[in-house]
Every structure is written in C-alpha cells, then in structure tokens.
Image: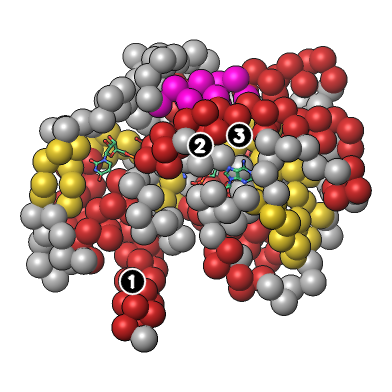
Amino acid sequence: MRRYLVTGGAGFVGSHLCDRLLDDGHAVLCIDNLVTGASHNVAHHADNAHFVFCYHDVVRPLGAGDVNGIDGIFHLACPASPAHYQQAPISTTQTAVVGTLNLLDMARAQGIPIVHASTSEVYGDPREHPQTEAYWGHVNPTGPRACYDEGKRCAESLCFDYHRQHGVAVKVARIFNTYGPRMQLDDGRVVSNFIRQALQGEPMTLYGDGQQTRSFCYVDDLVDGLVRLMNTPDDITGPMNLGNPGEVSMHYLAHLIGERMPARPPLRYLPLPTDDPRRRCPDIQRARKQLGWQPRISLEAGLNLTLNAFQKRLAHHLRASVL
Ligand code: NAD
Ligand code: UDP
C-alpha cells in the first residue's frame, strides 16, 4: 500500500483519481479548498480509514508534519473550466504558479515523485495539428485565457527547473478535454452545458459556427493514464499528452448528445469566446510508447455514462428543491 497526496481531490478528475487509488488498495490524503470542487464528490469515502480530506489552499505551503509518509503527489488543484478560471483570473494564476511551486518544494523535501496536471491549453490556438509534445504552442499572453494557459506554462517550466536543479522526479501530463460523471452541472464546459441543457429541455448553446474541434477523453481513461505516469521510472518526466485522439466538431458533439434525447433539442448560436482555440487533437505516440496507454472508452459509450449520471443528479436536485 502506498500513500498519495491528491491536490484538487474533491474536483471532477481528482475525485475519480481518489476512487481509483483507494480501489487499488492505496491510502489518499486529499487536499482541496473547494473553490470549484465539492465535498459530495468524495463523501462516499467518509468512513474509509484510508482516506483523509484536508481543507487547504495550495497557494499556502503545507506543514511538513501534514505530509510525512507520503509516497507521491498528484497535483491537480486548479480551476479548469474557462468560466471558472476567468471568474478569478489572478487567483487562477496564483494557484497555477505559487501552488505548483509549493507542491514542488514538498516533493523535493520529501524526495517523492510528483505528477503535475498540465493542459493542452499550453498549445493555445495551435498552428500544428495534431499537437505533439514538441510543439511550443501559440498562446495569447494577455487575453482572458492567459491566466490559465500562461499559469500552466509557467508551472511546467517550474517542474522542469526543479527536475534539472534539484533532481525532483517530475511527471508532467498535458491533459486534453476530459468529461464524465461529477462534472459540475453549471461549470460552463461544453459537455456539461449540452447535457444539462438537453435534459432540462433548453436549447444547446453552440458558440461560433460550431466547426471548432476538440478531442474528448472519458475520465476513467485519463485517470488510468495519470496512475501509469506516476508508476514510471524517475527519468520519465513528460511532458506527455493524455487525451483521446478522436477529434469532433462542437456541432457534431451537439448532434451526438441530441440524438440521445427523446426529442432532439434545438441549437442556440452564441458568439465565439475570445481566443477560443480552433482545433485541438493530441498526438499520443509518447503515452502509447512510454505508458502502454491509450483510451479505451469511445465517445458514444462515455456520453451514455455521463448522461445517466447527469440524469440522476438532476433528479436528485429536483427532489431536494421540492422537499
Ligand atoms: P475541477 O475544477 O473540477 O477540479 C479542480 C479542483 O481543485 C477543485 O476541487 C478545486 O476546488 C481545487 N482547487 C482549485 N484551486 C485550489 C487551491 N488554490 N487550493 C486547493 N484546491 C484548489 O477541474 P478538473 O477538470 O477536475 O481539473 C483537474 C486538473 O486537471 C486541473 O489542474 C486542470 O487544469 C487539469 N486539466 C483538466 C482538464 C479537463 O478537461 N477536465 C483538461 C486539462 C487539464
Ligand atoms: N462551447 C460551446 N457551447 C458551450 C460551451 C462551450 O459551443 O455551451 C465550445 C467552446 O467555445 C469551445 C468548446 O466548446 O470551442 C470547448 O469548450 P470548453 O469550455 O468545454 O473547453 P475548452 O475551451 O477549454 O477546450
């Protein structure tokens, strides 16, 4: 049994990672300030002696006593939805940069590996397609997405400096759009928006002409990639793309979700947000080779699982508001 620290463990991806680590027989210290996460995401572990939740903001360093006996860090704490990270952009940058600095200091002091959750946003609005890890990106450093994109780019540079200067075993995962149960109903991301809108009988909001593309990875596949990355030798540092290479337009995504409804919901066209990337698709050769990893769950199957989970959540909300 190993003991892992998961920052952002009460968030969407983090809570699934906690589930997986506990299922594998490990112990988890989950740290979160609940800014975009929720305690109900991890409430099912409340009676598990191997799970500890600690309310903490990663912008402040943790005490050494809090983390003694930790074998590895999964550092996920950071708002991820554009609506969330743009709501408090300065604090997003602080979390991405200062938070990562604090976790790297901890990894260094404890001599333990750290998996850092970076993002495909480091590629910005890419000029190379699909994106390999060798591509340096095309990011607007002053736009409304910069707090997240540049924050994560700076965090990556810190990871590699801690590796070169202090020998820290860093493992940088560049995560592409991930979806699944426990996304917040109102986080503004496209999968959660479309599914919630369709289930509530509202039009699905399509930004721009809907021809922009993304590549969606089901959360269990992503979590498996993160766990495999943690288990690699110290010289495997990444950066490593983790995502599903199946690229779809937002128009097609709306079609896929619409056809799963009893009646196809109408579309409502809204302006494209500033700096919205036009295309995004991961090249995952590196992950295939170094982790033996590739996504297993098709978009169709993953959307069915997500739809079922959203249906239950909405029914629960409805019951709670009636009572
Ligand atoms: P999320 O918002 O659901 O989860 C982030 C978690 O971090 C939340 O529980 C939040 O409360 C916590 N958090 C935020 N700031 C914190 C702070 N200062 N101190 C402590 N906790 C803090 O987002 P997610 O989709 O689960 O993303 C998790 C990680 O994966 C993020 O680092 C994100 O950048 C990265 N990522 C996610 C995606 C995706 O599509 N989901 C894509 C690329 C990268
Ligand atoms: N999008 C959309 N309708 C929505 C929410 C998002 O058409 O209700 C588009 C958005 O403009 C972007 C894509 O879907 O082109 C993915 O958006 P999301 O916020 O999920 O992720 P990101 O932009 O960070 O990849």
Give 4 or 292, whichever is nearer the viewer: 4
Placement of the N terminus among the 4 image quadrants:
bottom right
Q: Mark 1 to mark 3: distance in Å?
A: 31 Å
Quarter-of-image position of residue 225: top right
Q: Amino acid at mark 3?
A: Thr
Q: Within the magenta stretch, is there residue 295?
A: no
Residue designated by label 2:
175
Stretch in magenta: 145-155
Residue designated by label 3:
95
Q: Mark 2 to mark 3: distance in Å?
A: 17 Å
Query: Would residue 108 be found to the left or right of residue 83 on screen?
Result: right
Q: Secondary structure at mark 1?
A: helix
Residue 61 pos. (x, y %): 78, 37
Disc 3, ligand 1: is the CB inside 8 Å? yes
Residue 51 pos. (x, y %): 74, 65
Q: Secondary structure at mark 2?
A: strand
> Can residue 316 be seen in the rendering of this structure?
yes
Residue designated by label 1:
314
Secondary structure mostly taken by the magenta-highlighted segment of the chain: helix
Give the residue displayed 44% in from the left and 14% down from the top: 141
- Badge 2 crowding class, 10 Å Cα cut-off, few under 14, some 14 to 19, many 20 or more, is many
Say whether disc 2 or disc 3 marks the residue closer to the N-terminus.
3
Residue 21 pos. (x, y %): 69, 58
Q: Amino acid at mark 1?
A: Leu
Disc 2, ligand 1: is the CB inside 8 Å? yes
Say whether disc 1 or disc 3 marks the residue closer to the N-terminus.
3
Q: Report how many numbered discs are placed on residues in the image.
A: 3
Q: Is residue 307 positioned above or below 60 on the image?
A: below
- Badge 1 crowding class, 10 Å Cα cut-off, few under 14, some 14 to 19, many 20 or more, is some
Give the residue displayed 67% in from the left and 28% down from the top: 98
Give the residue displayed 43% in from the left and 56% down from the top: 183
Query: Would residue 295 be found to the left or right of residue 98 on screen?
Result: left
